[in-house]
Image (cartoon, grey):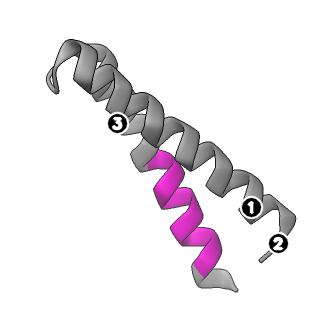
Amino acid sequence: MMMRENSLLSIIEKTRQEMIELAHLYGYSNPNVVQCSQQLDQLLNTYDRKSVKH
């Protein structure tokens, strides 16, 4: 696994944890939780695209 992928995985994990914490505090439909979820989706899509190339 390349260094960039490790870094991306680290960012994905941090974003996932942030989303979970926000959801516990504010509920799943809170705009901040939804925004964080969308950011996580984008990161996961990026990771998926990079993984397919290798």
- Is 40 situated above or below 32? below
Part of the protein shown in magenta:
42-51
Identify the residue at image location x=48%, y=57%: 44
Determine if the magenta segment contains residue 21.
no
Q: Nearer the viewer, residue 17 or 38?
A: 17
Q: Secondary structure at mark 3?
A: helix
Quadrant of the rendered image containing residue 23: top left
- Residue that label 1 marks: 6
Q: Are marks 1 and 2 in contact (CB under 8 Å)?
A: yes
Name the image quarter holding the N terminus: bottom right
Main SS, magenta residues: helix
The amino acid beneath tag 3 is Ser
Dot placed on the residue nearer the N-terminal end, 2 or 3? 2
Q: Which residue is mark 2?
A: 2
Coordinates of residue 35 in the picture (x, y in percent): 35, 25
In this orientation, which residue lies closer to the viewer: 41 or 9? 9
Q: Percent x, y for residue 53?
A: 66, 83
The residue that appears at 61% across and 77% down in the rendered structure is 51
Q: Is residue 30 above or below residue 35?
A: above
Q: Residue at x 64, y 71 (%)?
A: 50
Name the disc covering residue 37, or none.
3
- Identify which amino acid the numbered label 2 is placed on: Met
Q: Is residue 49 above or below residue 35?
A: below
